[in-house]
Each structure stands twice: as structure tokens, then as C-alpha cells.
Amino acid sequence: MKEPAATDADARADAEAFARAQAVMPGGVSSPVRAFGAVGGTPRFAARGEGTYLIDLDGRRYIDVVGSWGPLILGHAHPKVVEAIVRAAAYGTTFGAPTAGETELAERIVGCVPSIEQVRFTSSGTEAAMSALRLARAATGRSVIVKFAGCYHGHADPLLVSAGSGVLTHALPDSAGVTEGAVHDTRVVAFNDPAALEAALAPGDVAAVILEPVPANMGVVPPTPGFLEAVRASTTKHGALLLFDEVITGFRLGLGGAQERFGITPDLTVLGKIVGGGMPLAAYGGSRALMGFVAPSGPMYQAGTLAGNPVCVAAGIATIETLQREAPYAALEQLGARLQAGLDAAAAQHGTSITTQRCASMPTPFFIEAPVTDLDAAKRSDTTRFAAWFHAMLDAGVWWPPSQFEAAFVNAAMAEDDVDRVVDAAATAFAAVADTP
Ligand code: PMP
């Protein structure tokens, strides 16, 4: 690595900023994972981004493979996106009235995502997933939703549940403040287990099955061959709607997301992250018939003061337009494969057991030897060794996600050289953690 190594001891501005932040915000952060709880130490504060680099308050420069947890497929501060944001903001930041930009973004989404004929914009992925489930319940007249252990769909009460024991279970709340009543109609099954899903659907009371088609919130766990086909067949057979949460995979695995890559058509789709070009915007969509239930067309109420915000919409259009024009997906696939191979080779060289799982530009090195196919397997990873490795990566100038159970993201601002520098840093980090007990 050419960048100077840095240690937590040097992080004076960050430490001071974190102390101030903790006095006035719970844990000093606006979203929990940023606080480094899973890896220990003091979070570095972001000061600015430049393409593939993030620069912290102390002026240290990192290759950024977090990418704000997925949205930054074009890297930081892409000129086209910044220009669109500045232009839109100068015309007024919000109107609470329809704008032509919303229609243009909607048209681009409809043009790219196979199952979507109409969309509704929201401000966050949480809202979009929550609303899509309300729509599924409105459209089917059924109550129960099925989710998969380890899949994350935002923090709406009915979705804040992890798997209980057993294959088919009424789940227990995963957060204080979520009542048993709120999760009473949520059923949780293991990912990659079609028989468990079939059993959960058998009573005939399920409104929707929601899943990340390629889960990235327990680390990357690709669907085993045939699993998504089985999910589609079971939901159709039992009259439940299939809801793909493509907040991460949408515009990441290709313009048409996972549904295009795997050739499976869901009934409803949730989008977020990339679709807003790094601004707070998300969406849910589906067929014209299903979206016809949404107010004011139909009886399912859902609204938002800042929904379809013109500045966010402008960032989304600029991002999707750039992705359509530059078609970076083949290059991203290659960079992802290069990173995966590099990580596995570097770990082997230093005697650390990892299994790097990847879909397109999203890899996760699990600190465990066996392939990870569900949450139970993911949880067997050596998170202590991961935490030590994470800190060694940070010291070597790589901004890696501060948790074992997250995806890293390669972006289109990266070249092979950048990936090789990440791999070099990883080798140094694997060497550093070789003796971690
Ligand atoms: N769904 C998925 C798959 C996600 O990864 C996330 C956020 N990481 C969400 C929903 C929630 O989105 P938001 O944080 O914008 O509310």
C-alpha cells in the first residue's frame, strides 16, 4: 500500500468527534452498525469522498469498499450525479407536488426492472418494504408474511424478527419495543430450504413471501441452484405474493437486478440505495393491477411529505442514466471475481481459513471453511478473527464493512489496480491475524 498506515492511536480528530457525537446521539451515530460495535474501537469519521476513495477527518485516505452500504456503484461524488443534484437543488429542494423528474425516474425503472409496470417512491428502504407488505395484505386479504432468517428488510416492526428454533415458527421479536402482537403474523424460515418454505405456506394464510433474492445482510449467501425457482413455484401454488427486496441487488447485479439475472419474476419489488444515487430515495413496484391498490388509485394508504423529492430523483436519474450508458456490469463482475480470488489466495498463503462468497460485485469473506448457505452457518464464522482482520485492513488503508455479516461492494470507479491494492492490504491483514487465538 502506498498510503501511510494509520492506527487508532493516531485518530485524534476522529476520537474527539466521536466523543462529541456520543454526548448528543445514542452511540454517537445515526445507524447502529456505524458505531463499530461488532469490531470494537473508535469509528473513523468520513470527511469526504473522491471516486473510489474515502478521506477521514484526520485526512487519511482509504479505498472504499463499503460504498455507503451499496448505493455508490459509481463511486463517490460522480460528476454527473453531483451536477444533477446541484442543478435540481437550485430550482428548489421540495414542493410536495408532482414533478416531471419523478415520471422520468419511474419510466427508467419500468424500462429496466422486468416485473415493474408502476412504482411508488418513498424516502427509505424501510418504508418501501413496509408499504409493499401492506399492499400484499391489501391485495390478498391475508395476514401472514413469511421472511427468511438472516434477510433484512428495514426496521418496520413485523420484519424485526430472527428465526426461532425449528423449521416453521412464529418468530420472537428481535428488538426491545417490538410487541409479540406486531410479529404474530410473521413466519420465519431458513434460507435455501424449499421444504421449510412449503410447510410455512401450507396453511394457505400467507399474503407474501419476502426475501433478498441474494441475501447480503448475513454476508453474501447466494441462492442454491433451483431455490428461487422453488420459491416462485411454491408462492404461486399457495396464492401468496412473491416480494423481492432488491434494495441491495437492484441496479447492482445488472440494470434489472436479481430478477433479471436469475430469470425469476416476482409480484412485487422493493428498490433502494442505487436507485436514489446516494440520496434518500427508495421505491416499490409491481404490475399495474397490484399497484392499483395503492392510494389514491385504490384503498391501501401510504404517503410521504418528501417522497419523490426532486433532488433525490435527479440523483437517481443521473445514476441510472450513467449505468445505462456506460454498462459497467461486465467490468464489475470481473473486478468482483478478481477480489474474491485475491482474498482466498491471500488467506491461504497466511494459513487463515476463509470462504469468500460472491455474487457479481458483492463479496463476503466468511471466516469459516464450509460454504455458507443460511444464517446458522454464517453465525459459525470466527467473528473475533474477522474483527482483528478488519482493523488491520483499516490500518492498511481499506474501508471494509465493520461486520462479518455484510457485503463489500466493488464500484465502477475502481480499476484492477485498486482491487490489487485491496488484496495486498488483505494479505498484510491476514498475516497480522494469523496468530489471533
Ligand atoms: N432491504 C435491504 C435488503 C437492505 O439492505 C436495507 C438496508 N440496508 C433495507 C431494506 C432498509 O433500507 P433503509 O436503510 O433505506 O431503510
Image: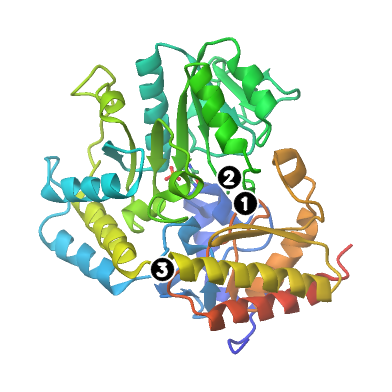
Tell me if residue 407 comes above or below residue 102 in the rendering.
below
Mark 2 or mark 3, whichever is nearer to me: 3
Q: Secondary structure at mark 2?
A: loop
Whole-angstrom CA distance, mark 2 to mark 1, is 6 Å
Which residue has dot 1 on it? 220
Q: Are marks 2 and 1 in contact (CB under 8 Å)?
A: yes
In the rendered structure, which amino acid carries the disc numbered 1?
Val
**Where does residue 200 sit, x and y in percent of width and height?**
62, 18
Cα distance between the residues tagged 3 and 1: 21 Å
> In the rendered view, would you say 429 is above or below 252?
below
Direction from residue 311 to residue 363 in the image, left or right: right
The residue identified by callout 3 is 328
Mark toward the start of the polypeptide (3 vs 1): 1
Residue depicted at x 72% and y 23%: 167
Instruction: Decide which of tag 2 and tag 3 comes sooner along the chain.
Output: 2
Residue 159 appears in view: no
Q: Position of residue 42 (x, y in %)?
A: 62, 63
Mark 2: few/some/many CA within 10 Å (<14, 14-19, 20+)? many
Amino acid marked by disc 3: Pro
- Residue on which disc 2 sits: 215
Give, as a three-letter code, the residue at label 2. Pro
Does 157 sit left or right of 302 as displayed?
A: right
Quadrant position of residue 65: bottom right
Q: Secondary structure at mark 1?
A: loop
Task: Describe the element under mark 3 as helix, strand or loop.
Answer: loop
